Every structure is written in structure tokens, then in C-alpha cells.
Amino acid sequence: MLHLTREGIQNRGEWERIGVKLPTYDVGAAQNLAKHAPRWVHLGIGNIFRIFIGGIADDLLESRVLDRGITCVESFDYDIVDKIYKPFDNLSLSVILNEDGTREYRVVGALTEAIKARSGDVQDWARLKEIFSSKELQMVTFTITEKGYALRNTQGSYFPLIEEDIDNGPEKAASAPAIVTAMLCTRYRNGKLPLALVSLDNCSHNGEKLRNSVLTMASEWRAKGYVDEGFLAYVSDEDTVAFP
């Protein structure tokens, strides 16, 4: 019986016999390097991310353009971490149906660590802060859907969850915009390190939507005394914190 784990894919002959392509790079090394020196974080780690973006990262690892995988962060459906990532050592089985009816099977090994962005989970929250404090971190990408960036309803009022995030501050952040802003606050307090925040969601002005959400949350926290004026300047400076 084949098992989708790091140990299980060592049985290369059986996987290849049934037509499944396996990584040619060292999956363990790519995972370990990302854990010790994370460079790319992704928020919103569902199916689209695992197969499409994970597949791109897998190609880059295969061509040796990348030397480490993606740190995977979930801010909404925490069961994904427990049921889809951890039992399988963060490996995914990609199945592509081509237009001629043929299929391509592939194990994606580019996903290195799965973390719940939940402030109530002390261990994962501390790990997330550690990652965002890393000098190696360069980019955070997003697939949280267009509504993931929304702060207000059609009447212009904040959604209840956003109101709670504004009142509770960075240490109890719950929504995706608040979590991102809280982690930027951690990065600011650990050297004001640069970072690119890149929305991959298919919506108009996606970078602008992400930036507006972060700046709004930061401004509200400044008004309540949770952050200082320097933090506002830090997230507003696109030469340091970029929103392409």
C-alpha cells in the first residue's frame, strides 16, 4: 500500500509504476531549510493554492531556482491543517485533467510547514511571529478570495469581526487583514524589515485592496494606542512594505 508521506514516497518504483511523478529534489532538505530560514509565506492554503501555486513552486524547486518551499498559513478553515497537511507531511497529490482526456499525476513537495493563524493557539501564534521576524522572509502571497480583504458592509460599517479586531488589538487578531497587520507589527518591532505582500486573488486592484485593509487596521490600532506612529509610517512606505 502506498502512503503519501515523506517516508512513503521513498518507494519510488511503486509510485512511478502507477504513473505518479515524484519530486527529484530533496523534499526533506527543502522543508527543513524553509523552517529554519523561511522566505515565502502563503495565506489561504486551500485546493487552488496547493495545486496551482504549489505546482509553480514545485517546478521552481525542480529547476533549482528555489532551494526551499512555501510556509503555509491558514486563517479561516483550521481543519485543513489537521486533516490535509499534517497527516501527509505537507505533501499533496496533484491530478490534472488535460483537454484531450489524459491525466497527469504528481506529488507536490513544495509545501513545507502548515500553521494555524489563530491567536488563541499559543504555539502556532508564537511560530508565526518567529517567521515574520526572520530576515530571510521576502514575500507573503494570498489566496483568501476578494471578500477576505473586505472590512465594511454595504452600508459602510465595519463587519462585527473587524470591529472586534479593532477593539482587541494585534495580540487577539482573528480576521485575515488583522492577522497580516499584526504580523507586520511584529516585523516592525524586530528591525523594520522589508516585505512584499502579493495578492494572487483574481479581483480588480487586488494589491490596492490588500494595502487599504492593512492601512485601515493599522490606523484604527494607532487611534486606540496599540501601535505607534512609526508603525503607520512603516506600513505606508511601499519602498519597505510593498503591495504589488
Image (tube, rainbow, N blue to C red):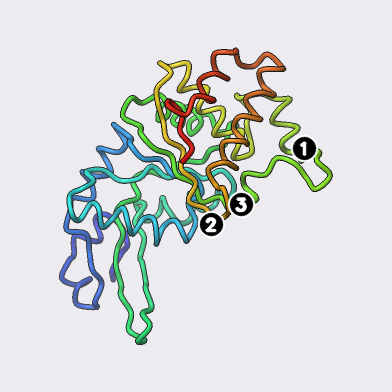
Helix, strand or loop under label 3: helix
Q: Is residue 173 left or right of residue 36?
A: right
Q: Quadrant of the N terminus?
A: bottom left
Residue 128 % position (x, y): 46, 32
Mark 1: amino acid? Tyr
Residue 169, labelled with which disc?
A: none
Could you give the CA–CA distance between mark 3 and mark 1, rounded to whole angstroms?
A: 16 Å
> Which of the two residues, 109 or 55, is positioned nearer the viewer here?
55
Tag 3–tag 2 contact (CB < 8 Å): no
The picture places residue 50, in percent across and down from the top left corner, at 41, 57
**Which residue is located at x 26 percent, y 54 percent?**
6
According to the image, label 3 marks what residue?
A: 146
Q: Quadrant of residue 218?
A: top right
Residue 119 place in picture, x, y as percent: 58, 31
Q: Secondary structure at mark 1?
A: loop
The quadrant in which residue 173 appears is top right
Q: Which mark is residue 202?
A: 2
Q: Is residue 125 above or below residue 210?
A: above
For marks 3 and 2 on the same chain, the one whose residue lies earlier in the sequence: 3
Residue 149 versus residue 179 in the image, above or below: below
Marks 3 and 2, how far apart at CA: 8 Å
The earlier-in-sequence mark between 2 and 1 is 1
Residue 158: give its label.
Answer: 1
Judged by depth in the image, the label closer to the viewer, 2 or 1, is 2
In the displayed structure image, the side of residue 130 where residue 59 appears, left or right? left
Of the pair 218 and 208, the residue shown nearer to us: 208
Label 2 vs label 1: CA separation? 23 Å
Q: Amino acid at mark 2?
A: Asn
Which is more toward the observer, 127 or 232?
232
